[in-house]
Amino acid sequence: MRCVVFGTRSFDESSLREANTSARHELTFIQENLSERTAGLSAGHEAACLVVGDSGSAPVLETLKAQGIRGLVLRSAGFNHVDLEAAARLGLPVLRVPAYSPYSVAEHAVALLLTLNRRVHRAYNRVREFNFAIEGLMGQDLHGQTVGVVGLGHIGLAFARIMLGFGCRVLGYDPAPSDEARALPITFVDKETLFRESFVVSLHCPLLPSTHHFVGQAELDLMPAGSFLINTSRGAVIDHRALIKCLKTGRLGGVGLDVYEEEEGVFFRDLSDKVLSDDQLVRLMSFPQVLITGHQGFFTRQAVTAIAETTIRNLDGLASAQWDPANEVHPAAHLA
Ligand code: NAD
């Protein structure tokens, strides 16, 4: 298939080239993200490959269709950047990478938690200036603490297993927990109990209408003083205005964010010589107890390789009109 790859970063190109054995698909790499402005670049191609940060809005999809695109392959598990109703109306199948190394994201969530709890980010800066004082760097044992996991799918389960290994008590919240999740020593509780009792809350649910601003003022108020909130799912699962209000009180022990509500146009870019116009993001960065990474949870060699291999298999499926049904996302998925 002739496939145009939007939002290409160097590792996308190298991993997709490697997975595209025998050069069976003709790949055109474009660094620009897919948008109404760039959709026309798909002319002459049969498939478009999207990443988080690309827009799959209805007008964009209409342009893709008019240019001859027959299907979309997503280099992600998440699909909230694509208007699935519009894709279905236009007859564009949407294939994603439902699972690729859940350990990559789960381990990054743990990295954020450990860094914040033991103040490693602060210690790193101190020691670089030959300041070896440890005042202000005290953390807490995680062993024996209660950890709340929101969403016990592939990633949430991997995270929960690590926390169980640390000797934590794990609480879970998931409207449809799998048998695998139920088989673990996880106590499933309602949302309120999870926020009230957890020393750490880690978010691993998808962004859906039901999870938009899932963490707002009410949930933050329930969290115990000194507790931690970790988000490696999607930015808009947290109401960041409410979060800033809560952070100003100094009640929370730490907040680790790998995703952010308005990350589009900011994350995945080097803006080091630009003025950051997002005041909310700048405010968040100003809190010493906040640690932000730019959506790198997935970024391990194993995960990137798996994403590329499934994406190429999805292109094989589009070419033969026989794709893996487990990789297709349908409009109803948005409504859960
Ligand atoms: P998954 O589909 O395997 O699991 C999602 C779980 O969330 C399911 O068990 C589902 O029942 C549950 N869920 C659905 N609605 C819920 C709700 N209202 N409240 C609580 N739980 C709910 O997905 P996954 O592979 O574990 O990925 C989870 C999310 O992580 C993705 O949707 C994506 O947004 C995010 N993600 C982030 C990165 C990153 O680099 N930071 C990478 C991959 C995925």
Image (cartoon, helix red, strand yellow):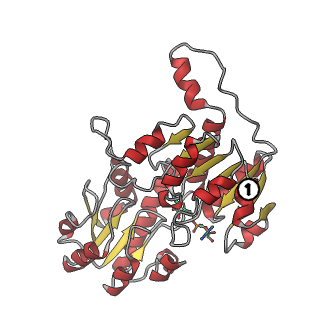
Residue shown at 52%/37% (left/top)? 287
From the viewer's side, name the closer residue of 324 and 136: 136
Q: Indicate the secondary structure of the residue bearing disc 1.
A: helix
Q: Is residue 55 left or right of residue 229?
A: left
The residue at the point 18 percent across, 68 percent down is 40
Number of numbered discs: 1
Q: Which of 297 and 10 is in front in this view?
A: 297
Query: Is 185 rendered above or below residue 229?
Result: below
Which residue carries the number 1 mark? 196
Q: In which quarter of the image is residue 196?
A: bottom right
Please tell me in which quadrant of the rendered image residue 171 appears: bottom right
The quarter of the picture where the N terminus appears is: bottom left
The reply, left or right, for residue 144 in relation to residue 271 is right
In the image, what residue occupies the spot 35% across and 73% down?
Answer: 72
Residue 318 position within the rendered picture, expressed as x and y whole percent measured from the top left? 36, 78
> What residue appears at the point 46 percent right and 60 percent down from the top-left corner?
307
The location of residue 255, given as percent across then percent down, is 58, 44
Q: Quadrant location of ligand 1?
A: bottom right
Q: Tell me the quarter of the image containing the C terminus.
A: bottom right
Tell me the crowding category of disc 1: few under 14, some 14 to 19, or many 20 or more residues within 10 angstroms, Cα based.
some
Residue 124, visible in the rendered structure: yes
Q: Which amino acid does label 1 sit on?
A: Arg
Residue 165 screen position, x and y as percent: 76, 48
Q: Percent x, y for residue 34? A: 28, 63
* Ligand 1 within 8 Å, label 1 CB: no
